[in-house]
Amino acid sequence: MLHYIENEAKARAEKSSTQAIIENVSRRHILGGALLASGLVLAVKIAPAIAREPLKPYPTGAEGMSDKTVNDPHIFIAIDKSGDVTIVTHRSEMGTGIRTSLPMVVADEMEADWARVRLVQAEGDEPKYGNQDTDGSRSMRHFIQPMRQCGAAMRQMLEAAAAAKWGVDAKLCRAKAHTVVKLDGAGKETGDSIGFGDLAEAAMALPTPAIETLTFKTPAEFTL
């Protein structure tokens, strides 16, 4: 019996000595080792976050759907006097997060603070909101461009409203972090700013800008 116990203890010790030791290794350490081992060098081009690019429409297949798409900020966006923003989400949630992701596209493009955004689910009304068939995992592909247009149009309306208040050219106004700031002739901020709430009524009263006049925060090559 003693001989068996000694052999069993020896076997367990040998097995323990061959087991892998798990360490807490950082992602940077792993990637660094992988790059050194493979000799792979990657070049990544990062665009400035504040880049403004002209609108570059591209085909998504959305125009082949019934009722197609709608991009009017008067339909999808509301701003109250406190500055809080309400964005209508017209697609139904099916587990892919689309109910949130499309409004986030609008909020990002119009420079709204996401912490001050409220979502409202649209009623079924395709002539008003565009196609609402939430199927085929196509919502982002079909509606990212219309939602970018919607947010960009609202941003331009806010900037136009600020320009009217200051009596300056709209080119000297830029939406930034839930406000519109004034720029000098060199494009630098002057320190003057107006919150979205103070511009809401005037901005929402403006007509929707023509698509060809819109600019995007993010260059077109970074879209889907």
Image (spheres, rainbow, N blue to C red):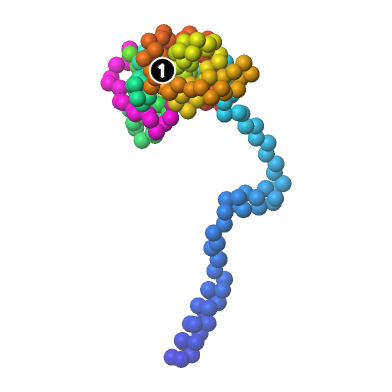
| Residue nearest the viewer, comparing 146 with 213 | 213
Instruction: State whether residue 160 is above or below residue 36.
Output: above
User: Which residue is pictured at 50% across the width and 10% down the height?
Assistant: 167
Mark 1 Cα shell of 10 Å, populated few (<14), some (14-19), many (≥20):
many
Q: How many marks?
A: 1
Tell me residue 66's x, y (percent): 37, 14
User: Which residue is pictured at 37% across the width and 24% down the height?
Assistant: 83
Instruction: State whether residue 101 is above or below residue 60.
Output: below
Q: Residue placed farthest to the right in the image?
A: 39
Report the amino acid beneath label 1. Leu
Please say whether residue 56 is visible from this viewpoint: no
Quadrant of the snapshot with the N terminus = bottom left
The span picked out in magenta is 110-127
Left or right of 107? Residue 183 is: right
Tell me residue 125's x, y (percent): 29, 16
Please say whether residue 67 is visible from this viewpoint: yes
User: Which residue is pictured at 47% across the width and 10% down the height?
Assistant: 164
Left or right of 24? Residue 179 is: left
Left or right of 173? Residue 116 is: left
The residue tagged 1 is: 199
| Residue nearest the viewer, comparing 60 with 101 | 101
Tell whether position 87 is magenta. Answer: no
Left or right of 15? Residue 117 is: left
Q: Residue placed farthest to the bottom in the image?
A: 2
SS assignment at label 1: helix
| Residue nearest the viewer, comparing 51 with 9 | 51
Tell whether position 119 is magenta. Answer: yes
User: Which residue is pictured at 46% across the width and 24% down the height?
Assistant: 179
Tell me residue 57's x, y (percent): 53, 15
Tell me residue 8's x, y (percent): 48, 82
